[in-house]
Amino acid sequence: MEKSSRNSKTKDSSSKLIFENPVLCAQFLRGYLDIPVLKEVQPEDIEDVSERYVHMFSEERNSDVVKKVHIKNDGTPFFLVSLIEHKAKVDYNVVMQMFRYMAFIWEDFEKEQERQHKGISRTKDFKYPPILPVVFYDGTEEWTAATSLHERVLLSDVFANCIPDYRCILMQLKDYSNAELMEKGDELSIFMMINKLHRVSDFEGLGKEVDAEYLKKAMADTPGHVLDIMAQVIEALLLKINVPYEEATDFAGQVKERRMGELFSNFEAYDVQATRREAREEGKREARNEDMAKFVSALKELAITREDIKIQLMKQFNLSEEEAEKMIAERE
């Protein structure tokens, strides 16, 4: 697994892997945005142009992707730009961030057209490509930030005609139940369910809800490169809950063998972090009991009275009188 997928920003890395893939991105545009002209989009219609704008991406927004989507509408080909920004937490300035992106993309388009046809941007028929500003939010809290630029500008009601009338498309993952996702019957629905896992306790619920037939059907024709991404996302998720790297790799390897049903069902018993925490606590208890036993034996060899031994136990090991009595009795 690449190092970039094992950083502290697991969700960001996973989302970037998902939306960079043309198969998964096409499924997202067709099935989640409810825009008629996107219903027939295929992977071959999507061109990733994120690298062209990478200098605008900050460390906090390294999961953003920019796609050029080629569309045939009534036989007339054109393209639109899909700008997908991932958020794991509510960001109150996202609408302005997206607006900066959009302005730069249009400026870049104009310059490119001017290089090819000088003066074309000043002609009557020149048009800029439409941009879909999508905010993909997979946090647990309700999204409460503005999605309209008007909401972010002071006195926008007074100066309404002077402020661009622009609104982000908010895709809030928490609004989709696992049952609704399974109805879509594609690989992206599996990724979406995985992205909804925020705590170890979420795994058990997923294992109970997910239908084996749905998994079998959804992954029947999944290309190898999509399975590879799915394995990486699963691995990143397991590493996030402190599963050791080798174990996470072996566990995620089930994905490449199309054994997702087994993977989800095993989540219930795979809380490695909790299991090891319990083992550490048990080890501490055993070591403490051994220390107390040695302490009692040493005082007895010094002919200390039983009552004084009890008092010393209570002081040294912060025991109640009952606990100290029990410890002495066990050593008699």
Image: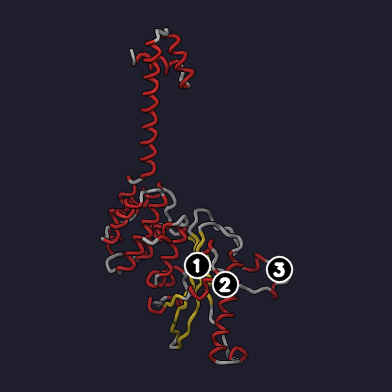
Q: Quadrant of the C terminus?
A: top left
- Mark closest to the chain's N terminus, 1 or 3: 1
Residue 81 picture location, percent across and down: 50, 77
Q: Position of residue 22 (x, y in %)?
A: 39, 73
State whether residue 181 appears in this view. no
Classify mark 3: helix, strand or loop: loop
Can I make out residue 43 in this image? yes
Circle 2 sits in a helix, a strand or a loop, which is it?
helix
Is residue 322 or residue 286 the one in the foreground? 286
Residue at screen point 61% across, 67% down: 96
Could you tell me the amino acid type at mark 1?
Asp
Q: Is residue 216 left or right of residue 50?
A: left
- Residue 157 tag number: 3
Query: Is residue 146 placed above or below 100 in the rendered structure?
Result: above
Alpha-carbon neighbours of circle 1 within 10 Å: few (<14), some, or many (≥20)?
many
Count of labels in the image: 3
Q: Amino acid at mark 3?
A: Asp
| Picture quarter with the N terminus | bottom left
Is the C-beta separation of discs 1 and 2 under 8 Å? yes
| Residue 64, disc | 1
Q: Nearer the viewer, mark 2 or mark 3?
A: 2
| Residue that mark 2 sits on | 101
Residue 60 sits in quarter:
bottom right
Assess disc 2: are there few (<14), some (14-19) or many (≥20) residues with their C-alpha within 10 Å of its C-alpha: some
Q: Position of residue 134 (x, y in %)?
A: 51, 68
